[in-house]
Image (spheres, rainbow, N blue to C red):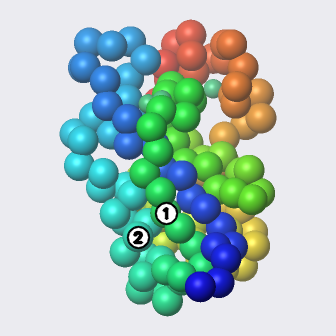
Amino acid sequence: MAKFEHHIFICTNQRPPENARGSCDSEGLGALQLAFKKELSARGLKSKVRANRAGCLDQCEHGPTVVIYPEGIWYGWVKAEEVAEIIDSHIINGKPVERLRLDNECINTPCCDHKTERKK
Ligand code: FES
Ligand SMILES: [Zn+2]
């Protein structure tokens, strides 16, 4: 079997509703990961691109959070209806969807506006 060319990690973490950090998959249905799998499959990419469920990626305030390797490109507040665009632009054409990317200032920083205000 050929090596995977991309791994897409989709946070499917759940926390109780009262938790201030929120959670990327509050309903626990894994719907976003399933959307990635479905769109990859529709494009014949299942053997090249892996869409993995991930636990908390520690970017909860920006969730639902997705990261794509090997590029290490992060996306935030991803909706199922945006999955096809991410696959077509980023995975197939090599152009990350800038509009949906998380700012570098938001990733792995102790605080950002989103973490202090939970803007969405
Ligand atoms: S709950 Fe998704 S990044 Fe933490
Ligand atoms: Zn932020």
Q: Which residue is mark 2?
A: 37
78 vs 67, left or right, is left
Dot 1: element: strand
Q: Position of residue 120 (x, y in %)?
A: 47, 30
Identify the image quadrant of residue 64: top left
Identify the image quadrant of residue 37: bottom left
Seen at 31% across and 31% down, the residue is 14
Which mark is drawn over residue 51?
Answer: 1
Which mark is drawn over residue 98?
Answer: none
Q: Position of residue 76 (x, y in %)?
A: 55, 42
> Can you say whether 113 is above or below 23 in the image?
above
Q: Do callouts 1 and 2 mark residues in contact (Cβ within 8 Å)?
A: yes
- 119 or 59: which is nearer to us? 59
> Can you say whether 110 is above or below 105 in the image?
above
Dot 2: element: helix
> Can you say whether 96 is above or below 88 in the image?
above
Q: Position of residue 2 (x, y in %)?
A: 65, 84
Tag 2: residue type? Lys
Tag 1: residue type? Ala
Q: Residue furthest bottom?
A: 44
Q: Residues within 10 Å of mark 2 (few under 14, many from 20)?
A: some
Among numbered discs 1 and 2, the one appearing first in the sequence = 2
107 vs 63, left or right, is right
Seen at 56% across and 27% down, the residue is 58
Q: CA distance from mark 1 to mark 2?
A: 6 Å
